[in-house]
Amino acid sequence: MVPKVQSAWWVIYHVDPKTGEYRYLLVKRFALSKKIEWIAPKWKIQPGETPEQTALREIYEEVGLTKQHLQIKQLLDTISLQLYTDAGELWVDKDITYYLVKYDGDPDAVKVADTEWFLGMHKWATIQEVLWLVIYKDLREVFRKAHQSIWSLNARDSLISKFF
């Protein structure tokens, strides 16, 4: 039996100071399929660690962004993923939890680790670029949901600020 893996992905965004556009952090990596792809940062949740603790620790370790500039805005989605071998045997069994994280620091501070999976490359992409670069349909849907959530959160905050 393949053990269930708990994984967390973070849709990290910032507001471009020149254009006011939302930009999303994508990192380039080697996939298990040996393809090179653009994805949102993600990591396995360690035993005894909450997804939020994993986020703050791993975002710093893997992309160099410090926690004083990160704000976890909301849980976006949780999906279950099972991958099978050609012989039909379960190979990967994981739950993936997606979070929306706002970054309010210097976007040039990103320093992606050059590890066996990450290629040391990143991009702050518009939502249109994300939808073009990300190959996984479910991840594109999470980015769409994140983009809509940011607009909703900002509208709510704007409305509240008018009354308080």
Image: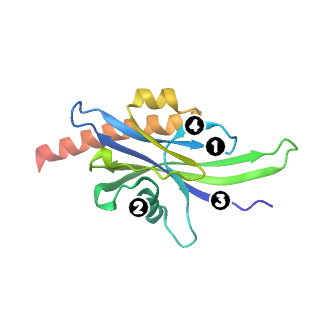
Which residue bears the numbered disc 2?
56
User: Is residue 154 shown above or below 111?
Assistant: above
Which percent across, then down, holds residue 13? Answer: 36, 43
Mark 3 vs 2, N-terminal side: 3
Question: In the structure shown, which secondary structural element does the residue marked by tag 4 occupy?
Answer: strand
Which residue bears the numbered disc 1?
31
Mark 4 vs 2, N-terminal side: 4
Q: Are marks 1 and 2 in contact (CB under 8 Å)?
A: no
Question: In the structure shown, which secondary structural element does the residue marked by tag 1 occupy?
Answer: loop
**What's under tag 2, amino acid-wise?**
Leu
Which percent across, then down, holds residue 82? Answer: 71, 48
Residue under the image location 45 percent in, 60 percent down: 61
Q: Are marks 4 and 3 in contact (CB under 8 Å)?
A: no
**What's under tag 4, amino acid-wise?**
Glu
Horizontally, residue 148 falls left or right of residue 29, namely left
Which of the two discs, 4 and 3, sits closer to the camera?
A: 4
The CA span between labels 3 and 2 is: 19 Å
Q: Are marks 3 and 1 in contact (CB under 8 Å)?
A: no
